Amino acid sequence: MNTMLTLLEGFVISIGLIVAIGPQNAYVLRQGIRQRHAVPVASVCFAADATLITLGVMGVGRFIAGNDTLSTWLGWGGVVFLTWFAIRSVRSAINPDIIDGNRMEEAAGSAAGGTMRTAMLHAAAFSLLNPWVYMDTMVLIGGVSVQYDTDVERGAFLAGAIAASAVWFYGLAFGGKKAAPLFQKAITWRLLDSFIATIMILVAINLARFQLTS
């Protein structure tokens, strides 16, 4: 497989999983909007994400690749999860859940993040205390990576996935203030969720094809 295409696949599957609004993203965006330690907060989230992705691709992924039964179960589990994620995104696109100012506060929690240390600790909590983050990074992304046979391909996939994390979290930090009004519009969420659904379906099809032919 072309290295650039592999890097791109790592990027799109990672960005597709990361962009779903949750407590972690809401907190980063909230800090970006308020310009309160936004870069340190984004750095904590990125470091946690990159570490878990790396463990998934280079550690858990290789263990899975050596276990045919586990690889098969995880592969088809990934297909099911990606399909479910796509369906959820389609539903959100049809009936977008707009995150307005009050909802953003609720999603991100009541932490004020007055000092840099406090803000970074909150970011770490939002990053590591959500069980879904381990499903997304170590299990799902690690599971997808088992289809690559060489270290070069796995490295490209890993680089793409980590690059997506950097683009997203630092994008939220630097662009939060300008983007907030845009993301209070239903059409923006419809377009974003439609994009996510398309990416997830394409990756699910590709992963299912790999499972059927391996």
Image (spheres, rainbow, N blue to C red):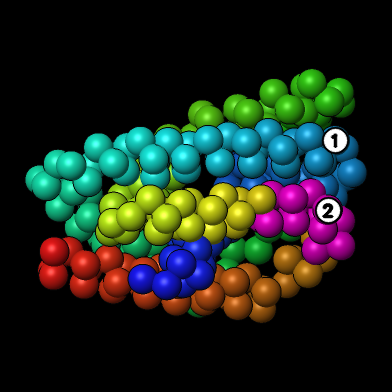
The image position of residue 126, as x and y in percent, is 60, 33
Q: Amino acid at mark 1?
A: His
Q: Quadrant of residue 90?
A: bottom left
Q: In the drawing, what numbered circle is on residue 37? A: 1
Q: Name the residue located 66 percent from the left edge and 55 percent from the top edge.
A: 168
Q: Name the residue located 73 percent from the left edge and 66 percent from the top edge.
A: 183
Q: In the drawing, what numbered circle is on residue 124? A: none
Taking depth in this image into account, of 166 and 94 the one nearest to the observer is 166
Of labels 2 and 1, earlier in sequence is 1
Taking depth in this image into account, of 134 and 9 the one nearest to the observer is 9
Quadrant occupied by the C terminus: bottom left
**Majority secondary structure of the magenta segment?**
helix
Name the residue tied to disc 2: 174
Q: Name the residue located 68 percent from the left edge and 56 percent from the top edge.
A: 167
The image position of residue 81, as x and y in percent, is 31, 57
Q: Which range of residues does the magenta coloring cover?
A: 167-179
The answer to whether residue 204 is above or below residue 59 is: below
Q: Secondary structure at mark 2?
A: helix
The image position of residue 202, as x and y in percent, is 37, 75
Residue 15 in view, yes or no: yes
